[in-house]
Image (cartoon, rainbow, N blue to C red):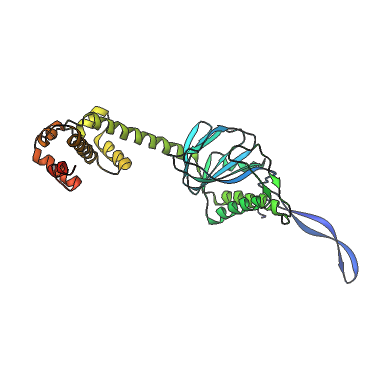
C-alpha cells in the first residue's frame, strides 16, 4: 500500500550497462501536491498598538493569523472570539473577517494571505490550531525568507503598496517562502490538533456573561453602599443563585463580594473624613455600621491605622 500522494507508474527509461544502451521499465514515483500554494498575497510580522483596530474585509483567497504575543479579538463571519498567544486561525476565501486589540493590550502577530485551491484546505475552515516549536519555526522562516526577498511597506490590511524584489536575492529564496508555508500546513493536518472556533466563541460569550454579572453586582453594591446587605439579598434582587454569583464574581475580581463591598465602604469613609464635617461615629452609621468600634476595626485592618489616626494624618 502506497502512502497518499505517491503514485507509482512505469515508464520506459534508457540506461547503460557494460557499454550497451538498453531500454527497460523502471518504477517512477510521482508526488501529488496535497496542498499547493500557487500565489502569495501578503506576509508580514506586526506589532500592534493598544488601540489597533481593523474593521474588516473579505477576499477570494485564504488568510491566516498567528498570535506571537498577547491576544487579539477576531471576527470570522458572524462569530467573535479571542485568539491567544501561540494560536493560529484561518479565514477561508469569501469569509468576512476583522481584528482588533483585546482589552487595549498590544500584541504581536503574523498574517499570511495566499491562493491555494487544494481540496485539503477544507481542513482549516473555522479552525483554531496551537503551533508546536517546529511549526512556529516554519512560519518564522517563511517571514524571514520573504523579508530577504522583497522590500515591502505593506501594513496589516493595507496591501495597496506592491513589494519590490530585492537585488542579489539568494537562489530559490522566494520559493522557500512557499515551501515553508506548505510545510506548516501539512504538519498541522498531520497532527490534527485543532478545534472548531465555535468552542472559542462559546468561551468568549461566557466571558461576556461573567463580566456582565460582575458589573451588575458592583453597580448594586455602589447603589447600596449606605446599607447592610447579604449575599442572599444581592442574588435575589439581581436574579442569580448565590453559588453562581460568588464563583463568577471571584473569577473576575479575585476577591469575595463582601470583601469588595467592605473595600467600597472604607474608600467612601476615607473620602468623607477628608471632605465632610461628619465625625467617625456619624460616618460609621451613614455607611450602615451601627457599631462604630466594629467600623474602626475594619478600617484599621484595611489601612493599618484607626479612623482617628487617619484623620490626624492630613
Determine the residue located farthest toward the front in the rendered image.
314
Out of 160 and 269, give the one closest to the viewer.
Answer: 269
Q: Report which quarter residue 168 is drawn in.
A: bottom right
> Which residue is depicted at the point 65% across and 36% down?
160
Q: Is residue 4 visible?
A: no
Determine the residue located farthest toward the right in the rendered image.
20
Report x, y in % for residue 94. Answer: 61, 33
> Which residue is depicted at the point 70% across and 45% down?
164
Out of 234 and 45, give the one closest to the viewer.
Answer: 45
Say if 220 sits above or below 70 in the image: above
Out of 292 and 273, give the one closest to the viewer.
Answer: 273
Number of numbered tags placed on the structure image: 0
Q: Is residue 135 visible?
A: yes
Left or right: 85 in relation to 218: right
Report x, y in % for residue 73. Answer: 48, 38
> Which residue is depicted at the point 91% across and 68% down?
20
Left or right: 78 in relation to 92: left
Out of 54 and 306, give the one closest to the viewer.
Answer: 306
Report x, y in % for residue 7. Answer: 72, 52
Amino acid at each position: 500500500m502506497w502512502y497518499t500522494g505517491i503514485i507509482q507508474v512505469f515508464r520506459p527509461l534508457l540506461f547503460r550497462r557494460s557499454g550497451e544502451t538498453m531500454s527497460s521499465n523502471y518504477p517512477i514515483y510521482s508526488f501529488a501536491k496535497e496542498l499547493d500554494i500557487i500565489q502569495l498575497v501578503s506576509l508580514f510580522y506586526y506589532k500592534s498598538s493598544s488601540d489597533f483596530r481593523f474593521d474588516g474585509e473579505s477576499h477570494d483567497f485564504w488568510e491566516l493569523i498567528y498570535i506571537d504575543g498577547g491576544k487579539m479579538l477576531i471576527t470570522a463571519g458572524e462569530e467573535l472570539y479571542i485568539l491567544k498567544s501561540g494560536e493560529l486561525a484561518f479565514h477561508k476565501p469569501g469569509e468576512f473577517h476583522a481584528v482588533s486589540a483585546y482589552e487595549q493590550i498590544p500584541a504581536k502577530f503574523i498574517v499570511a494571505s495566499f491562493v491555494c485551491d487544494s481540496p485539503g484546505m477544507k481542513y482549516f475552515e473555522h479552525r483554531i490550531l496551537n503551533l508546536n516549536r517546529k511549526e512556529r519555526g516554519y512560519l518564522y522562516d517563511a517571514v524571514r525568507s520573504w523579508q530577504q526577498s522583497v522590500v515591502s511597506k505593506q501594513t496589516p490590511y493595507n496591501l495597496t503598496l506592491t513589494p519590490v524584489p530585492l537585488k542579489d536575492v539568494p537562489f530559490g529564496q522566494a520559493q522557500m517562502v512557499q515551501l515553508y508555508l506548505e510545510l506548516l500546513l501539512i504538519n498541522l493536518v498531520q497532527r490534527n490538533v485543532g478545534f472548531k472556533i465555535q468552542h472559542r466563541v462559546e468561551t468568549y460569550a461566557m466571558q461576556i456573561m461573567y463580566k456582565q454579572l460582575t458589573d451588575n453586582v458592583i453597580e448594586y453594591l455602589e447603589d447600596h453602599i449606605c446599607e447592610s446587605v447579604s449575599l442572599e439579598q444581592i442574588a435575589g434582587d439581581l436574579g442569580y443563585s448565590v453559588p453562581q454569583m460568588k464563583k463568577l464574581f471571584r473569577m473576575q475580581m479575585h476577591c469575595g463580594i463582601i470583601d469588595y463591598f467592605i473595600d467600597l465602604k472604607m474608600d467612601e469613609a476615607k473620602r468623607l473624613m477628608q471632605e465632610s464635617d461628619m465625625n467617625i461615629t456619624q460616618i460609621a452609621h451613614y455607611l450602615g455600621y451601627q457599631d462604630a468600634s466594629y467600623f474602626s476595626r475594619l478600617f484599621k485592618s484595611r489601612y493599618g491605622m484607626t479612623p482617628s489616626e487617619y484623620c490626624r494624618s492630613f
